[in-house]
């Protein structure tokens, strides 16, 4: 049994070697298929498997608050950092890397050009977060400075409130809370974090959906191509199948032989296609957020799916070939 | 029919009708034929008289529309497709006019092919295939591909493939049809030797010269046997 398998595989490879043009077409079709597949699974993974494309979604902050941002060095703001205290700053790691690559930033005095005191002392360093929006192509974090609320002279302020239960039910209470400070304060917008996130994600999502559709179409074409190529190959092998039947091949033998050949073809095609797809893949992957080039999970999903789909595409003509009448098969030339 | 033990093939009132696009072709209309074990029989007749059709029915490649066919005591009509394949594999050896070797297989692999469908162990397959190739003097070309051989050589390989399973009957459909007379003679000589060694052979041929090799010649015309001749060339 194992012997025949090896012999069949050897035979399959020999057959491919003798038909370079045919093999090239198959490999190309499979390459397109793999490309489409990995794009598809990249999107799948990004959208479905990791709901938010962030390593630690908890660190998402939209306001100048350090509550959830991990403190890396120094100290956080305290209640003493008020209007009468020394003007202080907390900066992020990107800031340190850019402005204090060698020195310890804690205790350094920096001159700032926004309103309020010009010189401020750095008292703490916090981790990087995506503060303003989720630019899916943004790999680098930008330098950030945080100032205490009592030392700011910004004209507008965003305040984040952590709630239990439905945040929208608190809208009224929040308005009241602000207005107890000052009745004349205008409140421009009250929005849930989910909503804000969705807004920032809208365009990338759209890109992904578009890419998804393109990938589905490409995959469909690849499958059709594979089916066509296999069906064609099967037609070419009909005479041979007839000869094998004359000399005693059972329907199962023919089915096994054809599927094994298809498997060899698909395997060779997939591995060659993989190389091409890796090269082409860069283009596709650039469009996607945090899908590393050649993400092994994504690629193996794509390959497995394609092998399965390919074998399925072969199964139909293979079954037909296995059931053909030997006389009819022999008449093929 | 008296000596049933010695009868390999029994055909009675065999009919074969091909229906294509509402045209009915009566390829065989009432053929009676018995072939004894060890017999060498030739089937002759003009083109289109049904020789190949008869041979493919005898070889279980095709089924008759009507009539009885008994091969080695087994009624062909009662066989499933899988049983037919098994009998083709073990009991029947085919030689075609157009050789019908598989181009992607070497000479050795072509000859070995029927044995692989018997799930025979490799060592035994090798031994049998070698012996068959020796018999047709083609052992030295074992690693060649069919395309690298002359027509005569290809047909010799095809004969080796047909006899490698040691079948009950060898069916040859114009085995010399694509060969020049020198190569044709070699192949006929081989069949003759096989017969002498005990093989049962049923051969279709146009050539009256080759028909004389057989012990008996059956003349087909329009799907019927019109004449049977004993050659007197008995062992
Ligand atoms: N598959 C088929 N479909 C329809 N008609 C067929 C088929 N096979 C054979 N025939 C017809 O049956 C008749 C007998 O054909 P067959 O091939 O048996 O002739 P033959 O005696 O072998 O001829 P030749 O000497 O030319 O090989 C012919 O009229 C042929 O057209
Ligand atoms: Mg014929």
Image: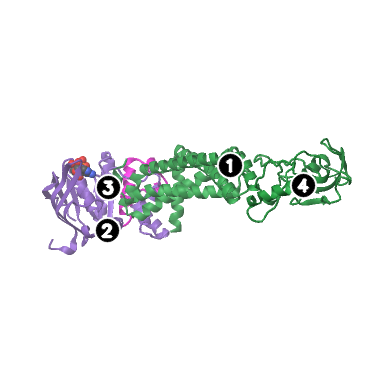
Chain colours: A green, B purple
Disc 4 packing (10 Å; few <14; some 14–19; many ≥20): few
Q: CA distance from mark 4 to mark 3?
A: 95 Å
Q: Is residue B145 magenta?
A: yes
Main SS, magenta residues: helix
Q: Do labels 4 and 3 touch, CB within 8 Å?
A: no
Question: Pointer 4: what residue?
Answer: A181
- Front-most of A63 and A139? A63
The disc label shown at residue B80, or none = 2
Check residue A327 in the rendering and tell me which mark sits there, or answer none.
3
Q: Residue furthest left?
A: B226
* Nearest to the observer: residue A118 or residue B229: A118
Mark 1 residue crowding within 10 angstroms, few (<14) / some (14–19) / many (20+): some
Secondary structure found at label 2: loop
Which chain letter matches label 2?
A: B
What residue did someone put label 1 on?
Answer: A205
Depth-wise, is mark 2 or mark 1 nearer the camera?
Answer: 1
Ligand 1 contact, mark 3 (Cβ < 8 Å): yes
């Amino acid at each position: 049994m194992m012997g025949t398998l090896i012999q069949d595989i050897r035979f399959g490879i020999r057959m491919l070697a003798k038909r370079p043009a045919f093999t090239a077409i198959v490999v190309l079709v499979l390459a397109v298929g793999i490309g489409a597949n990995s794009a598809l699974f990249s999107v799948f993974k990004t959208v479905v498997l990791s709901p938010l494309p962030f390593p630690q979604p908890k660190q998402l902050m939209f306001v100048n608050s350090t509550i959830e941002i991990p403190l890396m060095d120094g100290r956080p703001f305290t209640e003493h950092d008020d209007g009468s205290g020394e003007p202080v700053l907390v900066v992020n790691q990107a800031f340190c890397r850019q402005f204090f690559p060698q020195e310890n930033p804690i205790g350094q005095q920096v001159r700032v050009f926004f309103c309020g005191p010009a010189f401020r002392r750095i008292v703490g360093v916090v981790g990087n977060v995506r503060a303003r929006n989720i630019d899916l192509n943004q790999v680098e974090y930008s330098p950030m400075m945080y100032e205490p609320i009592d030392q700011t002279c910004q004209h507008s302020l965003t305040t984040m409130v952590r709630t239990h239960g439905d945040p929208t039910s608190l809208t009224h209470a929040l308005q009241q809370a602000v207005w107890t400070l000052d009745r004349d304060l205008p409140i421009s917008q009250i929005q849930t974090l989910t909503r804000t996130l969705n807004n920032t994600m809208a365009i990338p999502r759209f890109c992904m959906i578009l890419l998804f559709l393109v990938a589905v179409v490409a995959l469909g074409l690849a499958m059709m191509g594979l089916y066509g190529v296999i069906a064609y190959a099967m037609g070419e092998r009909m005479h041979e199948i007839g000869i094998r039947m004359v000399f005693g091949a059972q329907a199962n033998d023919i089915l096994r032989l054809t599927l094994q050949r298809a498997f060899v073809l698909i395997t060779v095609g997939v591995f060659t296609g993989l190389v091409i797809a890796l090269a082409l893949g860069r283009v596709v992957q650039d469009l996607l957020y945090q899908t590393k080039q050649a993400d092994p999970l994504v690629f193996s999903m794509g390959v497995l799916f394609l092998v399965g789909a390919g074998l399925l595409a072969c199964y139909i003509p293979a079954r037909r070939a296995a059931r053909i009448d030997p006389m009819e098969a022999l008449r093929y030339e | 029919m008296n000596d049933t033990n010695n009868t390999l093939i029994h055909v009675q009132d065999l009919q074969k009708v091909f229906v294509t696009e509402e045209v009915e072709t009566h390829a065989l209309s009432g053929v009676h034929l018995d072939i004894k074990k060890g017999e060498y029989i030739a089937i002759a007749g003009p083109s289109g008289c049904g020789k190949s059709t008869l041979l493919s029915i005898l070889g279980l490649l095709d089924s008759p529309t009507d009539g009885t066919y008994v091969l080695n005591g087994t009624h062909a009509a009662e066989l499933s497709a899988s049983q037919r394949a098994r009998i083709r594999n073990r009991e029947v050896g085919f030689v075609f006019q157009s050789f019908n070797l598989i181009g992607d297989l070497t000479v050795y692999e072509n000859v070995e092919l029927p044995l692989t469908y018997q799930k025979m162990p490799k060592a035994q397959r090798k031994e049998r295939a070698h012996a068959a190739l020796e018999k047709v003097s083609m052992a030295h070309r074992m690693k060649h591909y069919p395309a690298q051989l002359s027509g005569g050589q290809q047909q010799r390989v095809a004969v080796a493939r047909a006899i490698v399973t040691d079948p009950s009957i060898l069916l040859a459909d114009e085995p010399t049809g694509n060969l020049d007379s020198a190569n044709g003679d070699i192949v006929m000589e081989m069949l003759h030797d096989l017969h002498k060694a005990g093989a049962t052979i049923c051969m279709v041929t146009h050539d009256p010269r080759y028909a004389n090799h057989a012990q008996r010649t059956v003349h087909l015309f329009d799907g019927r046997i019109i004449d049977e001749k004993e050659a007197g060339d008995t062992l």
